[in-house]
Amino acid sequence: MALTAKMLLRQGQTLAMTPQLLQAIKLLQYSGAELAAFVEEELERNPLLERAEEGPDPAPTGIDAASAPVSGDEAAGLAHDPGEGDWSSAQLATSPQALAESLGTEVENVFDGERELSPAAERRQLENMGLSDSAWSGVGGGDSSGEPPNIEAYVAGQRSLAEFLGAQLTIATEDPIERMIGLAVIDAIDEAGYLRESAGEIAERLGVSIERAEKAIALVQTFEPTGIGARDLAECLALQLREQDRFDPAMAAMVANLPLVARRDFAALRKICGVDDEDLKDMMAEIRRLDPKPGRAFGGETVQPAAPDVIVRAAPDGSWLVELNSDALPRVLVNQTYAAKVSRRDGGGEEKSYLSLCLQNANWLTKSLEQRARTILKVASEIVRRQDAFLAHGVAHLRPLNLKIIADAVGLHESTVSRVTSNKYMATPRGLFELKYFFTASIAAHGGGEAHSAEAVRFKIKQMIDAELPDAILSDDAIVERLKAQQIDIARRTVAKYRESLRIPSSVERRREKQTALQP
C-alpha cells in the first residue's frame, strides 16, 4: 500500500461552544450576588450599557403555578420596551399613562426630564408627603446641599478579634521580635478563637526556634477573652478554668475525658475523677458555664442574608402565584441612541469595530438576562406545582422529586435544571428554601403505594424523637417499626443515618440526658 498525501472533502456535524454560549451557561448558574458583580463589571467595561434608573416597582413577573406549564414569554410574563433603551428582563415596561393614573396627575407631568422643580414646588411636594424641608436639615441631619444625612457614616465599625488581640500584644511586650511572632500567632487564630497552626509551623515560617514560638503562643493565651489561642477544646476549657482557679486534679481529669462528658457516662467519670455524684454534678455545671468559642463575641465577616430569586404567594383562588424577585435582578439597558450617534461619526475601522463589538455584547447580555429569568421562572413554577402539598401542609407532605422529572416537564436538559437550581432561593409562606431543597430521594412505601420523600421521612423521625418520654426512649428498631406502621419501608441503618444527619444522639445517650434533666 502506497502512502501518499491526498485532499478529501468530508461532511460532518460538530458542536462548537462559542464564548457567548459558555458565558450564558455561567450566567444561568450564577447566584444573585455573583450575577450582580458580573453586571457591574460589564457596566464598567461597555460604554453602551447603562444602569436603569430606579423607578416604581414593576408589575409582578410571574405565573399561576396551578395552571399547566407554559413556555416562552408567557411563562416569564416579561415585557419588552422597544423605546430608546433596550431593557433587560429585570426591568419591566411601565407606561406613563398607567403611572399617571396611579399618581393622580397628567401624563406630561410624570416623566418631565427637561425641567426641575422650583424650590417652592419641591417644598410643597415634601409637605404633601408628610415631610418638610426642615426634616433634612438643622440639628441632626443633612448639610448645606439639602441632602439627607448618611446614617451609616455615624455607625461605629465592629472591632475584629485580630485588632483586639493586636492592641493587647502592643501593651504586653516591647520586644519587636516577640511582637512579630505574636502577630503571626494572632493571624493563625480563627473566628472561633482557636489556633489553627502548630508552634512548629509558625517557627518554620518565621525562621525562629520552636521555643520562641511556644513562648509567643503562651503570651497570646493570657489575653482576653480567656481561652483564646487554644489548640483544641480541652485546652480552651483548661485556660478558662485556670483563670477561675478551678483547675484542680479532678477537673483536669474531666477535661481530659471530654468524650465521656459528651456521652454523659457518669459512672466512668466518677471513677476517673474520684468524686461522688454531688461533686460530679457541680463539675458538669461549671463546664457548661464555660465558653467553647471565645472568639465568637467579635464575629467575623458580615454574613449577607440570602435574597430570594423567586417569591411564592398564595393566590385568592387557592393556587400559588410564582413571581421573580425584581429586586434581585440587575436593571440594565442598551443605549441605542448613543450607539447610533457615535456610529454616524467619521472614525477609523478600529473604532467602528470596537463599537460594533460593544453593541453586540450589550445586546447579548440583555437577551441572556431575559432568558435566564425565563428559565428560572419555568423551573420554579414546575417545582411549586409538584410540591404544592408541602406549601399547604408542611415538610411531612414533601414529595419525592429529581432533576429528570422537572427537565422532562419544562423541556430542558437535566444539566440545565441543575444549574438553574444551584444557589437560587425561593421565598415561600413556610420560609426561605434553596431550590435544591425540593429535590429529595424516594423511599418506597411498605406494601406498595406512593413513595415517600426522604426529607419527609427525616422530619417524621425528628417528630418521634422530640415526642418521646424519658421512660420510653425509642431505639432505631422501634422507629423502624413505627414507620412501617405508617406504610414507610425503611432499613434500620437508614434511620441511623438520618438521625445522625439531624445531630440526634443515640437512644442510650438520649436516655442519660433526659434522666439527668429530671434529677433535682
Image (spheres, rainbow, N blue to C red):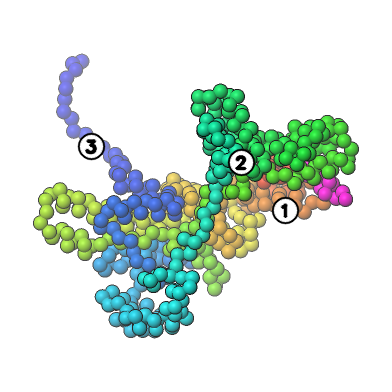
Return the residue at label 2: 193
Please say if 233 is above or below 358.
above
Q: Is residue 298 left or right of residue 243?
A: left
Q: What type is the residue that disc 2 sits on?
A: Gly
Q: What type is the residue that disc 1 sits on?
A: Gln
> Is disc 2 placed on a helix, strand or loop?
loop
**Magenta stretch containing residue 517, yes or no?**
yes
Question: Which of the two labelled residues, at mark 2 and mark 1, occupies the earlier sequence position?
Answer: 2
Q: Position of residue 520 (x, y in %)?
A: 88, 50
Q: Which mark is residue 11?
A: 3
Picture quarter containing residue 397? bottom right
Is residue 124 in view from this perspective? yes
| Closer to viewer: mark 1 or mark 3 | 1
Return the residue at label 1: 463
> Is disc 1 placed on a helix, strand or loop?
helix
Report the front residue among 476 and 400. 476
Residue at 28% from the left image edge and 63% from the top image edge: 86
